[in-house]
Image: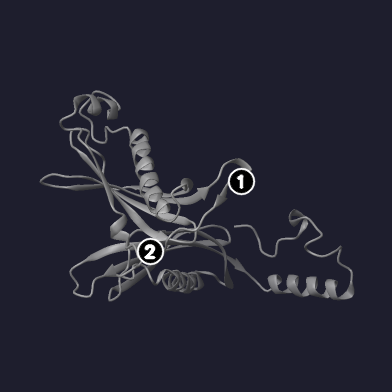
Amino acid sequence: MVRPIDTSLEQRLPLSTDVALQRRFMVVKEPLPGNVRYGLLLEVVDKLAEEVALRHARRTDPQAYVVMAAIEKVALRTPGDVNRDIELKARLNWVGKSSMEVGIRVEQPGSAPTHMASCYFTMVARVGEGDEARSVAVEPLEYLEAIDASRRDKARRAYELATIRAEELAPNRPVIVRVNRINFLQPVRIGDKLRLVSRVVYTGRTSVTVQVTIERISWDRVTRALCNTCVFMFVNVDERMYRWHQRLKARRAAGQGHGTRRERPYAQWPTPMPEP
């Protein structure tokens, strides 16, 4: 089977030596920090993600092509320097049935290398054209390092910690209403220790927003890195929420409701909790 590292593909943009290429990537002809056309750089990153996914998809079907399902995340870490080369390192992080997650690390090498950006794309393998087009299964990956084997467990633990923090502020009962985001920044390997920290980042009239950060610590305590940031929104509710459910159940039992949930438009159903 294919390992994630076997799908690696690299590309270098020689901005320091190619004057014409450097001018293409300049926003203005001024020595400004971050003077890089990120829109053009995104085109290059997008093309590289397609090449990585396409190479893997054609291991299964030589006629396969790939389409982008989502740009999961593009996180800019350090302002780019248009006078230095840019290196892009891409590989598959995860493969489902027909979908593939491509991770790309954008760096500027040198005596003091910098991490410019981290990008994550979801690509889907397809075959056929027009009405005949369909998704096609691709070869799975072999995860020798068991990277991110505990994604679900981390999300559950982050939610539980956020709930505990919300309960300290809510005078009645905090109820989850939204998962704003869960970002996966670094892979977690077997043997790593996780440190979870929660804090309240916003409070509204009835709402509480809690952020949970998860830091991974390697088994030898040499490497420490932020691997997840999670943001949850809770709403404080009182006993009226329970009365609403009881009243609705009573109406249904007595046959006084106006049809079932499936028969009525969703927008006509009452909301069981106040707006944030």
Residue found 47% across the figure and 56% down from its top = 99
Q: Nearer the viewer, residue 267 or 67?
A: 67
- Looking at the rendered structure, the secondary structure element under dot 1 is helix
From the image, tell me which residue sits under label 1. Answer: 132
Q: Earlier in the sequence, mark 2 or mark 1?
A: 1
Residue that appears at 69% across and 70% down: 241
Total marks placed: 2
Q: Which residue occupies 46% across, 61% down? A: 96
Could you tell me if residue 120 is visible in this image? Answer: no
Other residues around mark 2 within 10 Å, as few (<14) / some (14–19) / many (≥20): some
- 157 left or right of 147 in image: right
212 over 59 or under it: above or below: below
Residue 233 shows in this picture: yes
Q: Which residue is mark 2?
A: 141
- Give whichever of 150, 130 is nearer the camera: 130
How was this image coloured? one colour
Rendered-image quadrant of the N terminus:
bottom left
Q: Nearer the viewer, residue 10 or 169?
A: 10
Q: Secondary structure at mark 2?
A: loop
Coordinates of residue 45 in the picture (x, y in percent): 35, 42
**Is mark 2 in CB contact (under 8 Å) with mark 1?**
no
Residue 174 spot, x, y in % from top left: 56, 70
Q: Name which residue type carries label 1.
A: Glu
User: Of the numbered discs in the image, which one, if any, rests on residue 233?
Assistant: none
Image quadrant where residue 83 sits: top left
In the rendered view of the protein, which quadrant contains the C terminus?
bottom right
- Marks 2 and 1 sit apart, C-alpha to C-alpha, by 28 Å
Direction from residue 39 to residue 191 in the image, left or right: left
Q: Amino acid at mark 2?
A: Leu
Residue 18, horizontal then vertical, whole percent: 19, 28
- In the displayed orientation, state which residue is furthest to the right: 255
